[in-house]
């Protein structure tokens, strides 16, 4: 059985180290895992109930929800902006949390990872994302963490997929997320 993981990246910058980390996840996905990197978070308007209507929700939000519905698990990649997650990532969580009680997370396993310039690798942002996703109905795997510090220097000349330590850690995250998704699908 193959497990489909939807990857969402909180940085919109093309050369973002978190985007590179997500690209590494796509490349390093173990057998039985397909990682889909969602494109288009920048086009999704800020969540507003007035525009979230059954017959006319914005097309970019509908595309996100459809990708999420067809996924078995989620992997969020987030940098740390001013001590928390970027607005674009929080906005995606808000859209996926609706309709209330039946959002796209619907008990699916979720892991949050990422890299940041600081010495802790973005742990505050990761913790905030886990909290928000859990409240939105996701089954956050609390002990499944990867926070890589010093991104600006560590990945200055080395793509995360070519960093042996990071590649091994990321592959472990994917394998464990696959196990959790398999358990959820079997239940």
Image: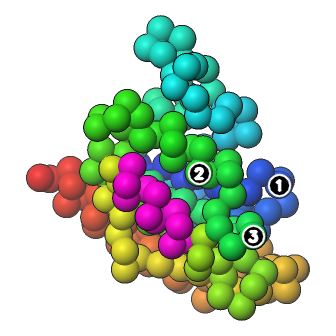
Residue at label 3?
82
Q: Compared with residue 65, is residue 150 higher up or lower down, i.e. above or below?
A: below
| Residue at horizontal 72 percent and vertical 77 percent from the top | 116
Under tag 1, what secondary structure? loop
| Residue at horizontal 84 percent and vertical 80 percent from the top | 152
Instruction: Please state which of residues 148 and 55 is positioned toward the viewer in this rendering.
Output: 55
Viewer-side label of 3, 1? 3
Viewer-side label of 1, 2? 2
Q: Earlier in the sequence, mark 1 or mark 2?
A: 1
Q: Label 2: how many residues lie within 10 Å, few (<14), some (14-19) or many (20+)?
A: some
Give the Cα separation between the discs numbered 3 and 1: 16 Å
| Residue at horizontal 36 percent and vertical 64 percent from the top | 140
Residue 86 — which label?
none
Q: Position of residue 170 (x, y in %)?
A: 53, 75
Q: Position of residue 33 (x, y in %)?
A: 41, 57
Give the Cα separation between the discs numbered 3 and 2: 14 Å
Q: Which residues are magenta?
A: 126-136
Instruction: Please state which of residues 123 and 35 is positioned toward the viewer in this rendering.
Output: 123
Q: Earlier in the sequence, mark 3 or mark 2?
A: 3
């Amino acid at each position: 059985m193959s497990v489909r993981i939807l990857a969402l990246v909180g940085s919109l910058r093309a050369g973002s180290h978190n985007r590179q980390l997500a690209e590494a996840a796509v490349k390093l996905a173990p057998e039985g895992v397909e990682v889909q990197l969602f494109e288009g978070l920048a086009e999704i308007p800020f969540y507003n109930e007035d525009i979230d209507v059954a017959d006319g929700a914005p097309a970019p939000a509908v595309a996100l929800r459809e990708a999420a519905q067809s996924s078995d698990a989620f992997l969020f990649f987030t940098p740390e902006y001013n001590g928390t997650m970027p607005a674009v990532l929080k906005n995606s969580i808000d859209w996926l949390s609706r309709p209330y009680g039946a959002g796209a997370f619907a008990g699916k396993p979720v892991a949050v990872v990422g890299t940041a310039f600081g010495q802790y690798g973005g742990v505050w942002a990761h913790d905030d994302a886990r909290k928000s996703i859990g409240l939105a109905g996701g089954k956050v795997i609390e002990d499944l963490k990867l926070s890589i510090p010093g991104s600006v220097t560590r990945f200055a000349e080395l793509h995360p997929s070519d960093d042996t330590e990071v590649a091994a850690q990321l592959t472990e995250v994917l394998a464990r997320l696959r196990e959790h998704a398999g358990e959820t699908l079997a239940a």
